[in-house]
Image (tube, helix red, strand yellow):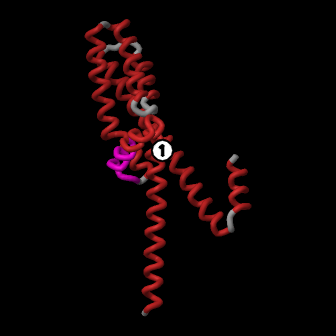
Amino acid sequence: ILNFLRKFVYAVFPEKTYYIIEKYFHSSNEIFFRFITSQFLDAIIVGSLVTIALLIMGVEYAPVLGFFIGLFNMIPYFGAIIATVISAIIVWITGGLSQVIWMVIVVIILQQIDANIINPKIVGKSLKISPLLVIFSVTVGGAFFGVFGMFIAVPIIAVVKILVEDYVDYKLAMKLANEEQED
């Protein structure tokens, strides 16, 4: 499908426009790939932290539960909740109510540290945007488009950032060219 889109754009638009579209398409594709890989890295970190915490607490099936929570962490907002609830049920069956309470407290703390510190740093560094902008875009994306918006907001804001930077660079170059012509 990518080859078809590339041929379609080449056929429909002038050559100069085609190369501009191709540049932004390539940049967008790279941004989405880096976003997915950074989310995967974050899931590994969360899964590892949860596994270590559960092992320290003596929870049965700690590696499986840590992997499960890390994997579901890739699903914005609801993933962490679903994984924590299912893990709490398993821990309740295997370890009792007091272990469930401690497990839920520890996982919630780790999830908050991840959501507010680790994930924005990893994703922000990967996409070259500020961690604050990551948190802001997830919040706005979620407010307007729900879970899907939370997931897609960060790569979209990274693409918009590139477009704005290129526009500013273009306008500055035009301004400098006009100033040189006046001299």
Name which residue lies at 39% across and 53% down: 129
Which one is nearer the viewer's eye here, 127 or 18? Answer: 18
Residue 116 is situated, as x and y percent measured from the top left of the image, at 31, 39
Question: Mark 1 = which residue?
Answer: 35
Q: Residue furthest bottom?
A: 183
The range drawn in magenta is: 129-138
Q: Is residue 51 above or below residue 113?
A: above
Residue 47: in magenta span: no
Name which residue lies at 54% across and 52% down: 28
Name which residue lies at 63% across and 66% down: 17
Residue 87 is situated, as x and y percent measured from the top left of the image, at 39, 17
Q: Amino acid at mark 1?
A: Phe
Which one is nearer the viewer's eye here, 34 or 86? Answer: 86
The C terminus - image quarter: bottom left
Number of other residues with Cα within 10 Å of mark 1, as a class: few under 14, some 14 to 19, many 20 or more: many
Mark 1 secondary-structure assignment:
helix
The count of marks equals: 1
* Residue 171 location, quadrant: bottom left
Q: Is residue 123 above or below residue 104?
A: below
Q: Is 40 on the left or on the right of 58, as rendered?
A: right
* Residue 147 location, quadrant: top left
Residue 62 is situated, as x and y percent measured from the top left of the image, at 39, 18
Residue 117 is situated, as x and y percent measured from the top left of the image, at 31, 40
Residue 136: in magenta span: yes
